[in-house]
Amino acid sequence: MAAVEPILGIDLGTTFSTAALVVDGKFHYALDGRGDSCIPSVVYFPRTGPVLVGHDAERMRATDPVNTIVGIKRVIARPLDSPAARVLDAASVFKLKGAGAGEVSVVTSSGEYTASQVASFIVRYLKERAEARMGRPVKKCFMTVPVAAGPEVREAMLRIGRMAGLEVLRILSEPVAGALARGLAGAGASEAPSMVYDFGGGTLDTTVVQRQGARVSVRSAGGDDCLGGNDFDLSFARHVASVLWGQASVDVTKDVLLFDRIQRQCELVKRALSGAKEARFLVPDALGTAGQRRNLDVIVKREHMVTPWKELVDRSMTVAAETIVAANVRPKELASVMLIGGTTFVPMVREAVARTLGVPLDIEADPQTAVARGAALLAVMPQMLLD
Ligand SMILES: Nc1ncnc2c1ncn2[C@@H]1O[C@H](COP(=O)(O)OP(=O)(O)OP(=O)(O)O)[C@@H](O)[C@H]1O
Ligand SMILES: [Mg+2]
């Protein structure tokens, strides 16, 4: 009997991308050289030599930020004057320009690349890493998109897959994939509606999903495509900047590279604060003048982050509550709230969901790969119907 052709489930994320496939009933991931399944959605375009993707590209960000592209998902199939493109342009050191109707491109020292081309480097990398893992070619995939993605984004995903050497067999929405990974389609799973609360790096997606027999449907969907972990980092960095301004009259936001270094430290410290009540915040040579550089070195506690993050957490809860109303259910009718996406590691977020919705939380040990796993699962469950 011919071996079943593997189908890669791909979650192209704003900050991290993941890909999984099911072979012989087991999940396998596209792993990078260090064994990580969360591949930074970062692409580095050197003047000469091969394009780098993932952690290898991420490492170049400090020294060559102009040619290191991050956050490209936000602008796929979006024109230069779209809010998403404006936000990315304002927040990044690299340059965006219009590339015809409905597309932007990035300008690098090795040339211009459309958003779809940049994304295709990430998808190709995932494909190659999956092939290396499985020891065989992978030619087909299921791709996921945010629930709010319109036809132009779906079209772009087909193109991105093709450019990466993959045939995109199906496109499904991220929350449905996440719910499948959480067992929504499994034997004995509840047929009551559930919420998928997916808080990622760049977007929040809140969705009420429901299974009825073999059919999984979206009862309502809400979200904010400009709200994610990146905003936690930015608001943390602004808090650091305002403390430094208050204590030493230093405006670190004026130095783009320094403020970028501070934001990256904020991301790391944010993660550390998910596992511990306090963490050391260290940015070498951040303060002072040439010849007299001092480190920025302080201890940050979880409680320090309550004020800077409150507005972001509150906004996410408003979106979740609106999504539940739109589904025409009461929170207590929900079987569970499935927490996926890396930002659901933040204790303040988990506490707010539990407190505000009062529904059992279904917490993932590995919330960042749930969407890719769900897409991979669907590939081996052709009987499931989605609408
Ligand atoms: N332990 C942690 N504590 C807090 N935040 C974390 C942790 N681990 C990852 N994150 C954050 O999770 C975010 C990435 O999550 P995820 O990989 O789900 O997003 P994404 O899929 O790239 O984004 P999107 O779904 O918005 O396109 C980043 O902002 C990262 O800093
Ligand atoms: Mg995601």
Image: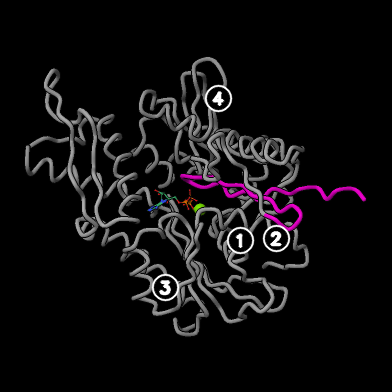
Which percent across, then down, holds residue 342?
44, 54
Tell me the quarter of the picture where residue 114 sits.
top right
Mark 4 Cβ inside 8 Å of ligand 1? no
Q: In this view, does 170 lie to the left or right of 259?
A: right
| Span highlighted in magenta in the image | 1-26
What residue is drawn where x is 8% and y is 44%? 246
Under mark 3, the amino acid is Glu
- The kind of residue tagged 4 is Val
Which disc is residue 177 wearing? 1
Using the numbered discs, state the Cα–Cα distance from disc 4 to disc 1 in whole angstroms: 30 Å
Q: Taking 113 as reference, is 184 above or below it?
A: below
**Residue receiving disc 2:** 378
Residue 35 pos. (x, y %): 55, 40
Q: Sequence-wise, which precedes: disc 4 or disc 2? A: 4
Helix, strand or loop for disc 4 = loop
Instruction: Tell me if residue 365 is in the magenta stretch.
Output: no
> Do the numbered discs 2 and 3 sit on residues whose CB atoms are within 8 Å?
no
Mark 1–mark 2 CB contact (< 8 Å): yes
> Mark 3 — residue?
322
Q: Distance between the residues labelled 4 and 2?
A: 32 Å
- Left or right, 33 with respect to 65, comes to right
